[in-house]
């Protein structure tokens, strides 16, 4: 989602140090919002299209996941924008990425640009919000069926598949597969492409424990400079964040847990340096070190 408005010139005569707004990340389990409260908030905050989508789910668990995720989006964006939750007009691009409809004059609170991205899985919703550029996020739980993970693995580059299969079948291999998947999802979503970008056209080199050592972008990514963060905010819940890298100082990330109506202090994390491009003759050889 992007909301952009002209920015006024900075006051004062001399240059000011660059202040990079933080990336804000919300991880909200479904049980953070009681079902009755969720229903009330959804009735008052969600628009006609969102409520119609919720009504089409066959299973109550899926409907609940959708309602918690989208009330989370509206509450967090309302706090950032200075607008009422029901005032936010959210639309989607042709590829399905959500955006906030621009407002004349910009935001009532804190500048004129917001971008957000949402992911949900296994009873958790993950929302990323930035005031500059774009953000992509993904969350996965380590409870996926083995067959589904093997299918996911086939979408990766040969080098990534080799690295994942160096781990024995079971939790260690599952973790490697889902680390790659969340990073690929976060990057593709940040670019607004979703599953329209084949996952074997770009590659990650990962540390065996956690962290991106190198990134080989797809051919259509002219800049190719990105910061990637891997998180396990609660046990067996893997998350990834992707933001474009520029020459400004490294932004930090504020990780909030729960629904955005308490005053709990967020966890502050400095985003890693931009991922480097591996010095390899072929993209598929970009694998984690032995």
Image (cartoon, rainbow, N blue to C red):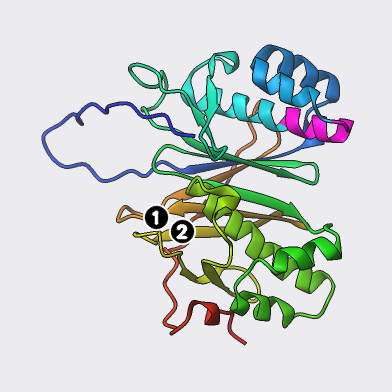
Residue denoted by label 1: 250
Residue 227: mark: 2
For disc 2, the neighbor class at 10 Å (few under 14, some 14 to 19, many from 20) is many
Q: Nearer the viewer, residue 247 or 143?
A: 143
* Above or below 61: residue 47: above
Give residue 270's position: percent from left, percent from top: 49, 55
Q: Among all residues in the image, which is located at the extreme bottom?
A: 290
The range drawn in magenta is 58-68
- Is residue 46 in sight in this rendering? no
User: As drawn, which residue projects farthest toward the left?
Assistant: 13
Closest to the camera, between mark 2 and mark 1, is 2
Viewer can see residue 14: yes
Q: Main secondary structure of the magenta part?
A: helix
Residue 221 sits in which quadrant?
bottom left
Q: Does the magenta segment cover residue 63? A: yes
Q: CA distance from mark 2 to mark 1?
A: 9 Å
**Above or below for 141 versus 118:** below
């Amino acid at each position: 989602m992007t909301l952009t408005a002209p920015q006024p010139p900075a006051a004062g005569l001399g240059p000011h140090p660059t202040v990079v707004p933080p990336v804000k990340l919300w991880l909200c389990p479904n049980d953070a919002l009681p079902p009755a409260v969720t229903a009330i908030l959804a009735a008052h905050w969600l628009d006609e299209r969102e409520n119609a989508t919720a009504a089409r789910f066959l299973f109550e668990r899926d409907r609940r996941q959708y309602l918690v995720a989208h009330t989370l989006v509206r509450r967090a964006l309302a706090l950032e924008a200075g607008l009422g939750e029901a005032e936010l007009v959210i639309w989607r691009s042709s590829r399905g990425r959500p955006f906030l409809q621009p407002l004349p004059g910009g935001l009532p609170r804190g500048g004129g640009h917001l971008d957000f991205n949402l992911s949900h899985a296994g009873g958790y919703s993950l929302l990323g919000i930035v005031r500059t550029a774009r953000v992509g996020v993904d969350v996965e739980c380590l409870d996926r069926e083995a067959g589904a993970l093997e299918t996911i693995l086939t979408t990766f580059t040969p080098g990534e598949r080799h690295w994942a299969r160096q781990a024995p079948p079971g939790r260690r291999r599952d973790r490697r597969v889902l680390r790659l998947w969340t990073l690929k999802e976060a990057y593709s979503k940040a670019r607004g492409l979703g599953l329209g970008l084949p996952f074997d056209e770009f590659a990650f080199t990962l540390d065996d424990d956690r962290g991106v050592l190198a990134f080989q972008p797809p051919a259509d990514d002219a800049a190719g400079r990105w910061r990637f963060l891997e998180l396990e905010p609660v046990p067996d819940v893997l998350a990834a964040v992707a933001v474009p890298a520029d020459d400004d100082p490294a932004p930090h990330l504020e990780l909030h847990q729960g629904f955005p109506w308490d005053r709990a202090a967020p966890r502050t994390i400095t985003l890693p340096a931009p991922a480097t491009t591996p010095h390899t003759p072929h993209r598929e050889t970009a694998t984690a070190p032995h």
